Image: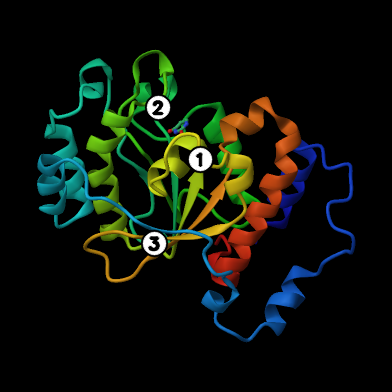
Amino acid sequence: MDELAALRLQIIWGADEILLPEPQNRRAAKAAAAEPVAVKLKPPPLASVLPAGPAEAVKIADGCASLEDLAAALRDFSGCALRDTATHLVFADGAADARVMVIGDAPGAEEDRTGKPFAGPAGQLLDKMLASIGLNRGNVRLANIVPWRPPGDRPPTEAEIAVCLPFLFRHIVLLKPDCLLLLGTVATKSMLHMQHGHAGIGQLRGKWYSIEIAGAVAPFACLVTYHPAYLLRMPAAKRDSWHDLLALRDRLGDENSAP
Ligand code: URA
């Protein structure tokens, strides 16, 4: 793990209070823990079986045999009006063999301009957060619920989400990550298939969930946390977010240490 990055993050986040009652040597704790990582998972409080989505999108997405095919299929897909107002498709960034897939809501202005997810200020904070637990764009995958910027940065509608989700599901099935990190309300409620008005992100964060996606051999473990854009507006939430990152690091074990 990059100790310097962790220290830098603490300074950026204004780490001036005690988060845990006792100092913790997490490396020693990990070395002592001989049981497989999966055993450390708490039983999922919610198990979602995701609905497939609109038939045409499902058919196209499920016909893709590789991530390259999937990106090309999305580029040609005309079933979502967001494409008409966006400059670029924002498909993904990061490794094609990542153990962690980070899922945000929708591209913003900078992402639309560059074609890369998390290219703006929230992305810069996300990079620092990931670095603090030994992750970076070389060993994680980044994508969004919808791959085109909604006009005026409004939240994507339920119809837009429904038509884009089959492509994201296929992305996950082809990538086969060990776990998903869901950032914020839109990603969480879309992926856990929850209705609006259900529990808020403050109640959902910091817990592991299990989702089943058609075509995948096993369910995927998902951790929910705050969106970095929210953390930029609400710095007090960074403390909880740090706990969530530690839970992700514990889940991954030492293998995720950055080269
Ligand atoms: N916010 C997101 O959720 N995704 C991005 O790509 C950028 C900002």
Is there any visible trace of residue 220 in the rendered image?
yes
Instruction: Indicate which quadrant contains ligand 1.
Output: top left
Residue 20 placement, left or right of 230: right
Locate residue 133: give its quadrant. Answer: bottom right
Q: Is mark 2 within 8 Å of ligand 1?
A: yes
Bin the neighbour count of mark 3 within 10 Å (Cα to Cα): few under 14, some 14-19, many 20 and up.
many
Q: What's the residue type where badge 3 is placed?
A: Pro
Q: Residues within 10 Å of mark 2 (few under 14, many from 20)?
A: many
Residue on which the image places disc 3: 177
Q: Which residue is mark 2?
A: 111
Q: Real-space Cα distance between discs 2 and 1? A: 29 Å
Which of discs 3 and 1 lies nearer the camera? The answer is 1
Residue 198 numbered tag: 1
Relative to 165, 19 lies left or right: right
Residue 114 appears at what percent x and percent y? 36, 26
* Secondary structure under the numbered disc 3 in the rendered image: loop
Quick check: is the Cβ at mark 1 less than 8 Å away from ligand 1? no
Circles 3 and 1 in contact, beta carbons < 8 Å: no
